[in-house]
Image (tube, helix red, strand yellow):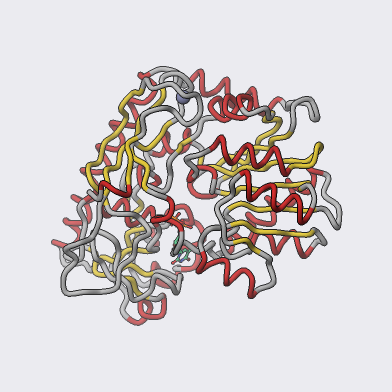
Amino acid sequence: MNAENVRPVTRCRVCGASNWQEVVAFGDVPLANAFLEPAASYEDEPAYPLGVVSCRSCRLMSVTHVVDPEVLYRTYSYVTSGSETMTRHMEFVAEVCRERAGLAPGHLVVELGSNTGQQLAVFARDGARVLGVDPARNLTAFAQRIGIPTLPEFFTPSTAQAVGRAHGPARLILGRHVFAHIDDLAGVLAGVRTLLAPDGVFAVEVPYAVDLLEKHAFDTIYHEHLSYFLMRTLDTLFTRHGLSLFDVERLPVHGGSLLVLVGLPGVRPVTEAVGTLIAAEERAELGTDAGYQEFVRGVHTVREELPALVRSLVAEGNRVAGYGASAKGTTILNLCGLGPDEVAYCTDTTRLKQDKVLPGTHIPVRSPEHARADPPDVYLMLAWNYADEILRKEREFLRAGGRFVLPFPKPTVVSADSFR
Ligand code: TYD
Ligand code: ZN
């Protein structure tokens, strides 16, 4: 472990308590997006403790250790995928935000963690003034080139003030899958309060802890994801910071997510959807230690059965490759102890990842062209959150006798016959 870049979590970043239930502990694991150049040896590869605990007071699920964001984000290899699923999703997010925030041409839309600017491009197309804020210098340069103005910074109260001075208040502030990556939630929410117009909306998209728990999808647990939120926890968080969570949409992306809509208290009525989800969490006993036991058993089962299944396929003479070198994928391979002996390569559409090797397992990443020229017998579905789209795209592979292994909620094999 590299002690200088990591610190253990002591107090809850939502409620300040320090009474934790241990949920899972995975030992030292390399960073999920730290792809490496191929090398003869990987002796100095850093690894950091990875585990999840649940706050007995507000039921925030948190990683046990926080890695310095300068290490994680200044150069970043996660690029918003240009997949059909994601493109459609971005249109949907824009539609919900437009309607809830009453967006009109000329309004300011600010996105935190704007990555390559694809989501903001949707708002810009409809006439909004847009501004991205993202610390990943390699990605903001790309966003600028496609015409999306972007500040290469972390979003802090002082960044918020500077943006407000230069551009005026924001009608919409958006944080898509960035919120779970933030340790200093108080700082970000202070910035949001500074920059948001009085009737503005802060829209936050996070992976939903209930989906993680139900699917046993422990591969979404990696160092970048500091928080796994329940609705009740989000509600507590925003209330503590002088904001009001007034509406929510439950979405299928990234294995199951929430889009929560937040404003200043009293501006908009709180919809029924908010109470409905909080009540369902109560019924599932997620306010008590017992509510997490089934997840712990499910994780254990997948970590035993998945490597056993892959090894038996290899032993029968099949060549296995990974589909998608997602952060989830690198995590599941590391946590299941699968390496190049079992998984020949991982195919991925992201140029930044191709011809590198996966963190920890050192499995090579290959382009889709390479994979088509040298297909395996079986694909391990690592980007399972895009399973529908991928299975459609790989009809030919299936028709030719190829199979896919789906890891969650329990490892299963699918072939062309599965769709008859
Ligand atoms: P994603 O689930 O978006 O992210 P995370 O890294 O947070 O787990 O990653 C999906 C990965 O799968 C991404 O690297 C792109 C890749 N991918 C393909 O290679 N082919 C595809 O058809 C799709 C949809 C994704
Ligand atoms: Zn708490």
State the image coordinates of residue 374 (x, y, percent, origin top left).
31, 79
Q: Quadrant of the C terminus?
A: bottom left
Query: In the picture shown, does residue 127 fall above or below 364?
Result: above
Q: In the shown orientation, is residue 148 left or right of residue 39?
A: right
Q: Residue at x 35, y 55 (%)?
A: 32
The single residue placed furthest to the left in the displayed view is: 315
Q: Of 110 and 369, which appears nearest the observer?
A: 110
Q: Residue at x 73, y 34 (%)?
A: 263
State the image coordinates of residue 87 (x, y, percent, origin top left).
62, 61
Query: In the picture shown, does residue 78 fall above or below 231?
Result: below
Q: In the shown orientation, is residue 210 left or right of residue 366?
A: right
Q: In the shown orientation, is residue 166 left or right of residue 324?
A: right
Q: Residue at x 38, y 59 (%)?
A: 33
Residue 384, image quadrant? bottom left
Residue 143 seen in the current view: yes
State the image coordinates of residue 159 (x, y, percent, origin top left).
63, 50
Q: Residue at x 62, y 37 (%)?
A: 189
Residue 419 seen in the current view: no
Query: In the picture shown, does residue 73 fall above or below 174?
Result: below
Residue 18, image quadrant? top left
Q: In the shown orientation, is residue 300 left or right of residue 169?
A: left
Query: In the picture shown, does residue 51 fall above or below 292?
Result: below
Q: Of 139 and 349, which appears nearest the observer?
A: 139
State the image coordinates of residue 55 (x, y, percent, origin top left).
41, 24
Q: Of 144 and 5, which appears nearest the observer?
A: 5
Q: How many marks?
A: 0
